[in-house]
Image (spheres, helix red, strand yellow):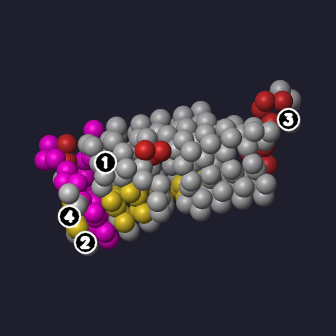
Amino acid sequence: MDNEYINEKVFQGINFFESGFKTSDYENCKFLNCNFTNIDLSNNCFENCEFKNCNFSNSKLSNTALRETSFKSCKLIGLQFQDCNSFGFSVNYDQCLLDFSSFFKVTLDNSTFKNCSLKEVDFSNSDLSGMVFEDCNLIGAILENCNLEKADFRTAINYLIDPEINKISKAKFSIDGLIGLLTKYDIEIE
């Protein structure tokens, strides 16, 4: 059965946990102050959509398409982004809480995280080339076997990156952030 096509619609203040969420193809839609907590968003397509002040905590994303989609001031705790449809996957996050989420083996090249909390997020085996982590907290984030080429960590904090198991050519770091690259060597930096 084909999904319904919904274009240029604004959804505001809806608690989908109570009302339910219809599996559809959403294009150029806006979701403002909506609650998606524990909602199964599997097999939905969101293209050129915008989410503001929405709560997605513990939602399911199996085969969910996120194409040119932005999240601003959203709560996205514990989401498994590796379950999303990888075709055209393109997202931008601004002032979002993504703690305990996973991007395992996800290609996120040329996307952005701006002013986000990324505590204990699993980025292992991901392609983060060209990513910008602007003013993000990466405490406990797993960055192993990643392509971090040309990624920008200059304003990010609390990251630990092992240069021996990650590709970091032309990545950008601040002087203050060098400790995040050298921690494993048990050296003192003054």
Q: Which residue carries the number 3 mark? A: 189
| Apparent side of residue 112 relative to residue 154 in the rendered image (left or right) | left
Of marks 3 and 4, the one in the foreground: 4
Circle nearer the N terminus (4, 1): 4
The quadrant of the image that shows the C terminus is: top right
| Apparent side of residue 90 relative to residue 127 in the rendered image (left or right) | left
What amino acid is labelled 1 in the image?
A: Ser
Circle nearer the N terminus (1, 3): 1
At 42% from the left and 53% from the top, the residue drawn is 85
Secondary structure found at label 4:
strand
| Apparent side of residue 155 relative to residue 55 in the rendered image (left or right) | right
Q: Which residue carries the number 2 mark? A: 7
Of marks 2 and 4, the one in the foreground: 4
Residue 20 lies within the magenta run: yes
Which sits in the foreground, 122 or 182? 122
Residue 80 lies within the magenta run: no
Secondary structure found at label 1:
loop
Residue 37, given in percent of the width and then of the height, sits at 28, 41
Residue 4 is tagged as 4
Q: CA distance from mark 2 to mark 1?
A: 19 Å
Q: CA distance from mark 4 to mark 1?
A: 14 Å
At 55% from the left and 58% from the top, the residue drawn is 112
Circle nearer the N terminus (3, 4): 4
Residue 176, given in percent of the width and then of the height, sits at 76, 45
Numbered disc total = 4
Of marks 1 and 3, the one in the foreground: 1
Secondary structure found at label 3:
loop
Give the answer, above or below, for where 3 lies relative to 140: below
Q: CA distance from mark 3 to mark 4?
A: 58 Å
Q: Which residue carries the number 1 mark? A: 42
